[in-house]
Amino acid sequence: MSRFRRDKVDSMAGFRTEKPEAPVPYGLLKAARKSGQLNLSGRGLTEVPQSVYRLNVDTPEEANQNVSFGASDRWWEQTDLAKLLLSSNQLTELSDDIRLLPGLTTLDLHDNQLSNLPSALGELQELQQLRLSHNQLTSLPVEVCALKNLRSLTLQKNLLENLPEELGELECLTGSDVSNNNMKDLPSGLGHLTCLQKLNVSHNKLTCLPDSLPKLTKVKLLDCSNNQLTHVPASLSEMLALEQLYLRHNKLRLLPQLPAPALKELYVGNNQIDRLETEQLSSLAAVSLLELRDNKIKSLPEQITLLNTLTRLDLTNNNVSTLPATLSLLPNLKVLLLEGNPLRGIRRDLLAKGTNELLKYLRGRIQEEPEQVDNRPTAMTLPSQSNVNVHNIKTLKLLEYTGKQADVVPDEVFDAAAGQSVVTVNFSKNQLTSVPPRLVEFHSSLSDINLGFNKLTCCSPDICKLLQLTHIDLRNNQLSDLPSDLKTLTKLRSIILNYNRFKSFPEVLYQLVSLETVLLGNNQVGGVDPSHLVKMVNLSTLDLSNNDLLNVPPELGLCSSLRCLSLEGNPFRTPRAAIVAKGTDAVLDYLRSRIPT
């Protein structure tokens, strides 16, 4: 055996040079020249490689090779880069070389470690979307305000203390999110953003709103939650398009007086409001949703009836001890939340039965005229009608046959309402196995139907002929499906399906874009399709509690119209119970953060 160990050596080693691995694969750059899009999200980049900045400047490698090009490989026909995604990296700065990409329309830099931005950003005159959220920016360079085509600017979760006055020069801006920063005031130039439709300034340190804000006459959604506002100027009612106003978690002591003509949803939960005054209530003529939870309200005035468009009233966790009977006269009220109040004179089991039963109880407390009290048979009342409240039919347009444990509704009940424009039907708490066919007699007027607490195993297509329906209550039955013709009910705003046997989200509901409330709690639903839910643009309340959801799709977070999402009592692992307990906003934020970029 040789005395010397001879290892195998590479005789060509001296002639080779090690090629460092490119931070961006060449194949990606080549594809970007064709598509105009480059996605470098989540690659651990600490800086943007020069090859990216010079993508449309330098001649590509294949041009120097002696090869013949096919139709798909003609480098000289490359497309200017229009979309550059650099999110979720570790970038601490952006080079002035960004000006070498003048064709950019979308630049996504969110979730990095940027503390400043180059002035060269102002040269990207084609830019329409600029995403800068989740960074460490303390200021926004004034050059950004020169981007005349910019339509969307997101700056949430930075360290901004102010915004440049020149922000008003972004004349095409339609949406801006500057939430979760350290701003104590907003620039007056904000009022020049005449195309703006959505503005989120929540989670800052604002003590007042700029006088120029009412000039934003196209803004539909304004979120000022989690600030230090002590009042809201009445001039905000000049925002003629304003539909949703969020003022949660501020220091308001009075309900804002806002006669904004389009305002439908007002959220003032978690403030210091201790009373409701007539002037404020009378100004909210068009509001359908009023959230007053977690305040210090002690009582409701009789003038609550001024809110005749109200469909949802949230008074959770206040100091209300009594309810005025006139509350039951609100013609459109469908959801009344009262948990956490020291109510006296109303049994807990009555509260647990839901809004309809509570309003019915309150209606019973209203003094009736003497001639309305006696329901015994008279010369004007046929014996067959003695079990029917004819007064309610004529004055309240309400047809009731409830709590009789009957398997059919007698013809006498319908006969008593013949020729009347019945608006509300309540046949709950019986033993009905099918929808009464004679309901179609009220097809031109019926808007509210309650068939809860029966034994319905299927929902008759006859109900689809009631084209004026806005509310259907089918809770506590044995339903597992809904008829496909239900899609013809284009005015339907709410449907209650709790305590049935649904194993999936009823497909037909996805087609009802008018729906605002869907209650599907305590069923066996195993999943929902977020791609369809996101198209239900009016859906604000979705109850999926106590079902069989094994997972919650992250895309559900894109349902921006949702204001109340109940997921408790499902076997999914994420989001964790601690997140679910924080409420709808926290759940939606979490879900959005899980969407793959």
Image (cartoon, rainbow, N blue to C red):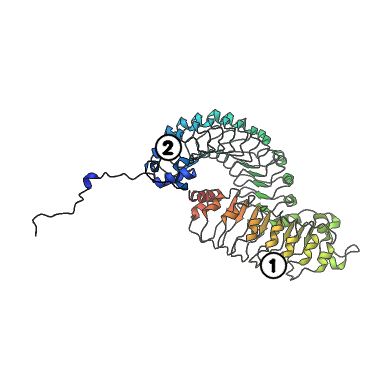
The x, y position of residue 70, in whole percent, is 45, 48
Residue 38, how many percent across, how many down? 46, 44
Nearer the observer, 373 or 213? 213
Relative placement, left or right, of 432 versus 381 is left
**Mark 1 or 2, nearer chain start:** 2
Instruction: Give the SS element for disc 1.
Output: loop
Three-letter code, disc 2: Tyr
Q: CA distance from mark 1 to mark 2?
A: 68 Å
Residue ranking furthest to the bottom:
407
For label 2, the SS is helix
Residue type pointed to by label 1: Asn
Residue 21 locus on image (x, y percent): 33, 45
Q: Which residue is mark 2?
A: 53
Q: Quadrant of residue 261?
A: top right
Q: Residue furthest right?
A: 379
Decide which of 342, 277 is in the foreground and name it.
277
Contact between marks 1 and 2 (CB within 8 A): the answer is no
Neighbour tally class for label 2: few under 14, some 14-19, many 20 plus, Cα within 10 Å: some
Q: Which mark is nearer the camera, 1 or 2?
A: 2
